[in-house]
Amino acid sequence: MVRPIAFLVGLFFAGMLVYSGIRGAIVLVTEPTAKTAEKVFHKHPRHVDWSFNGPLGKFDQAQLQRGFQVYKEVCAACHGLKLVSFRDLQNIGYTEGQVKTIATEWAIETPTVNPETGEPATRKSIPADKIPSNFANDTAARAANNNALPPDLSLITKARHNGPDYVYSLLTGYVAKQPAELVKQFPDSEIKKGSTLHYNPYFANLNIAMAPPIIANDQVTYGEGAPKATVDQMAKDVSAFLTWTAEPKLEVRKQTGLAVFIFLLAFTWLAWMSYQNIWSEKKKKA
């Protein structure tokens, strides 16, 4: 008695599953998902031929230093790097003395506690300190940015698909005015006069609270021998720097992977030769 009942119950659930699948397919064909402004006008990041691309790619330390300069003079006003210490900058070519100078002269001092009064205080940063944020907490950050919270940039290139390309495209993708076709098709998406939003087709929902951070050539003054500080070049440099902050061991990881690959090839060849040597005599006897 139990088996027939179990069979009928299973048959019922299988039938409901088939019915749901057919019903879903019919709805998908007859009632397609409505188009949205984001789906129609969003652009995928533009590809850049980075020096660190590919299995043998490496960071360009000169570019990383320029990128840090752009971060320091432009991005640090709103965005933090809470996972990066000043001493980490030695890994991109700065000397110990230069790192000490950068830490000491950093515009924002490191939060601490006054040992005499127990009250919050600040002090000059040292190389062991994390790079301090411009804001004490998220509430202060929102208050200074029209209630928009600037994300920490330590891992931004890992948190976004095609991270380096995304950051570069976002920085160079601002458009002064929304396309007329967008406003015509999606009137509700129009940025109203007086709004603090800015149109950028590379941003997920097209309208971003961050104003264009890099707006003119030579906004940052590069040192002697460096390429001209165009908007495009500065965007590439800071994108490369933020890739390093997210993956500081990228070169070591690639070198390790290459060594493991070579070892496995050699091991496979030795194993095959051993197999041939062991079984060759047995095959002859057979």
Image (cartoon, rainbow, N blue to C red):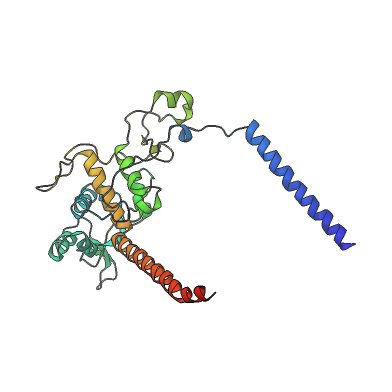
Observer-nearest of 272 and 79: 272
Task: Classify 80 as above or below 210.
Answer: below
- Total residue callouts: 0
The percent position of residue 40, horizontal first and vertical second, equals 46, 32
The percent position of residue 225, horizontal first and vertical second, equals 10, 47
Q: Quadrant of the C terminus?
A: bottom right
| Residue lying farthest to the right in this orientation | 1
Image side of residue 88 versus residue 35, left or right: left
Task: Classify 124 as above or below 162.
Answer: below
Observer-nearest of 83 and 46: 46
Image side of residue 285 versus residue 47, left or right: right
Residue occupying image coordinates x 25% and y 69%: 114
**Residue 145 at least partly seen:** no
Q: Quadrant of residue 129?
A: bottom left
The percent position of residue 6, horizontal first and vertical second, equals 83, 59
Residue occupying image coordinates x 16% and y 60%: 94
The percent position of residue 243, horizontal first and vertical second, equals 31, 53
Q: Quadrant of residue 253?
A: bottom left
| Residue lying farthest to the left in this orientation | 224
**Residue 137 at least partly seen:** yes
Observer-nearest of 149 and 61: 61
Image side of residue 28 versus residue 182, left or right: right
Q: Quadrant of residue 135?
A: bottom left
